[in-house]
């Protein structure tokens, strides 16, 4: 939530980060993101239909992009990846309280699909930039 607040220009002018600082950022990972909003280009899972407990406006991270070369030519891609598992109470606000603590505390831990995917995304972002 705190990282998202620093990046979101609607909560902090200019995302709270200078232009020089912004140009150095190529990957941002929000695991168990309580600011989750469905159908955004930075969402990793498309099967999480509900807003998070502290959801943001739809364009909160739209300005966070970088140039990627992973296809062999330069392409502008989102720098943000938001991970929200479907029954995580905090990022889905869906009445899943009986599962919430287990999913929220263990569903993103080391060795799980979200954490491995996030690590691969960060590595790719750092090795395939202009």
Image (cartoon, rainbow, N blue to C red):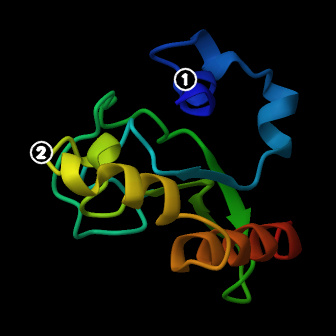
* Visible residue check, residue 109: yes
Q: Position of residue 117 (x, y in %)?
A: 60, 77
Viewer-nearest residue: 111 or 79: 111
Viewer-nearest residue: 107 or 8: 107
Image mark for residue 95: 2
Give the side of residue 54 with respect to residue 120, left or right.
left
Q: Position of residue 115 (x, y in %)?
A: 62, 70
Q: What element carries label 2?
A: loop
Q: Distance between the residues labelled 1 and 2?
A: 25 Å
Q: Mark 1 points at which residue?
A: 5
Q: Where is residue 14 in the image (x, y as percent from the top left)?
A: 63, 17
Q: Is mark 1 on a helix, strand or loop?
A: helix
**Label 1 Cα neighbours within 10 Å, binned few <14 / some 14-19 / many ≥20:** some
Task: Identify the residue at the far bottom of this view.
Answer: 72
* Visible residue check, residue 37: no
Name the residue rendered at 28%, 39% in the picture: 52
Give the side of residue 120 with respect to residue 99, left or right.
right
Which numbered disc, 1 or 2, marks the residue that appears first in the sequence?
1
Q: Where is residue 70 in the image (x, y as percent from the top left)?
A: 71, 83
Residue 13 to residue 15: above or below? above
């Amino acid at each position: 939530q705190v990282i998202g607040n620093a990046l979101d220009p609607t909560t902090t002018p200019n995302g709270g980060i200078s232009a020089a600082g912004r140009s150095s950022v190529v990957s941002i990972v929000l695991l168990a993101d309580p600011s989750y909003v469905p159908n955004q280009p930075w969402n990793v899972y498309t099967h999480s239909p509900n807003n998070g407990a502290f959801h943001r406006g739809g364009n909160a991270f739209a300005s966070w992009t970088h140039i990627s070369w992973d296809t062999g030519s330069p392409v502008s891609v989102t720098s943000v990846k938001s991970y929200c598992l479907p029954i995580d109470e905090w990022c889905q606000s869906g009445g899943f309280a009986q599962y919430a603590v287990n999913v929220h505390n263990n569903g993103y831990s080391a060795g799980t699909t979200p954490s491995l995917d996030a690590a691969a995304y960060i590595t790719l972002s750092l090795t395939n930039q202009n």
